[in-house]
Image (tube, rainbow, N blue to C red):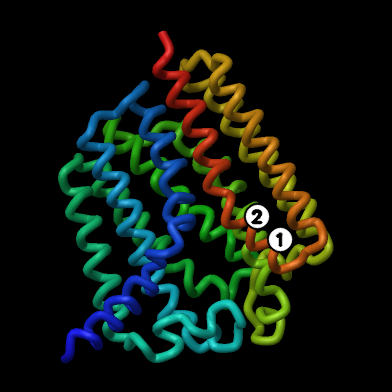
Amino acid sequence: MSGGKVSVLGAHYLQLIRWDRPAGWLLLLWPTLSALWIASGGFPGWHLLTVFTLGTFLMRSAGCCLNDVADRDFDRHVKRTANRPVTSGAVSVKAALLLGAALALAAFGLVLTTNTAAVSWSFAALAVALVYPYAKRHVAMPQAVLGVAFSFGIPMAFAAVQGHVPLLAWLLLLGNLFWVLAYDTEYAMVDRDDDLKIGMKTSAITLGRFDVAAVMLSYFLYLLIWTLALASLSGLALNGAYAVGVALAVVQAVWHGCLIRHRERAGCFKAFRLNHWLGFTVFVGLAVTYALP
């Protein structure tokens, strides 16, 4: 194989794992790091920070490989996804699955450097990740399944730090699930017309004319659950830093509501892409709170 062909194929593999679209793995990273800080009572140490940062990137990349294989017959009918590598034939199904498996194994290797509790919960996390691509065929709100998959870094973080998963972790997972519902419904609103034609099930279709209201309610529930759970169960004195973080998150949520209110593709996609800043804002508020004396 010539150098040019290798270069082109490498570009297709990078496109497959969404290398050029970091928003997806950042949406996974910020709640995971937030949980890591909460479970540790502050900075968790470089080992766990490295494990969960790299593990998040690897698992999201593996998920993209599986998702594109599962959706290859649907993606060709959707404007935004018609040119994805597996759908277009640039990368074979076998190659995509092998890459996904290699990435997942690399992530598992990182988990093995933590403790037994985290290793045990990693199998549950993998099971949910495997189920999600097929939920879109059978579940009216597949975004709820994605919400669990994209929130599982939270109990994993607690397990790695504390050796068990307390009630607080599950409440944070529940709150984060609502955030995933918010931003993935925005994402689904982009493809609603195409998804209706091919019979795909999404929250944007299920919610119908209540989609914008549901997105805004989901943002509200996410921030409310996290704030109440942290105030009542974590022993954390929520100072001004966290309050500022939540206030800035609320401002961003309102802005996203403005972007999606007319249900235009460009506005909905922009709102989705910018959501990682909302998660980053909450994380920074927490990190500064723990750093202050």
Q: Residue at x 42, y 61 (%)?
A: 128
Is 43 displayed left or right of 146 in the figure? left
Q: Residue furthest front?
A: 4
Q: Are marks 2 and 1 in contact (CB under 8 Å)?
A: yes
The circle on residue 118 is none
Q: Secondary structure at mark 1?
A: helix
Q: Which quadrant does the N terminus fall into?
A: bottom left
Residue 280's spot in the image, x, y percent?
Answer: 50, 39
Residue 190's spot in the image, x, y percent?
Answer: 67, 69
Is 93 displayed left or right of 113 in the figure? right
Q: Residue at x 48, y 50 (%)?
A: 27
Is 18 displayed left or right of 8 in the figure? right
Residue in the foreground of this view, choosing between 34 and 83: 83
Residue 87's spot in the image, x, y percent?
Answer: 45, 87
State whether residue 110 is above or below residue 162: below
Quarter of the rendering containing residue 205: bottom right
Residue type indicated by callout 2: Ala
Residue type indicated by callout 1: Gly
Marks 2 and 1, how far apart at CA: 6 Å
How many numbered circles does the render carry? 2
Q: Residue furthest top?
A: 293
Rate crowding at label 2 as few (under 14), some (14 to 19) or many (20 or more) other CA atoms within 10 Å. Answer: many
Residue in the foreground of this view, choosing between 60 and 165: 60
The circle on residue 271 is 2
Residue 21's spot in the image, x, y percent?
Answer: 45, 62
Q: Residue at x 24, y 77 (%)?
A: 98
Residue placed under numbered mark 1 in the picture: 267
Q: Secondary structure at mark 2?
A: helix
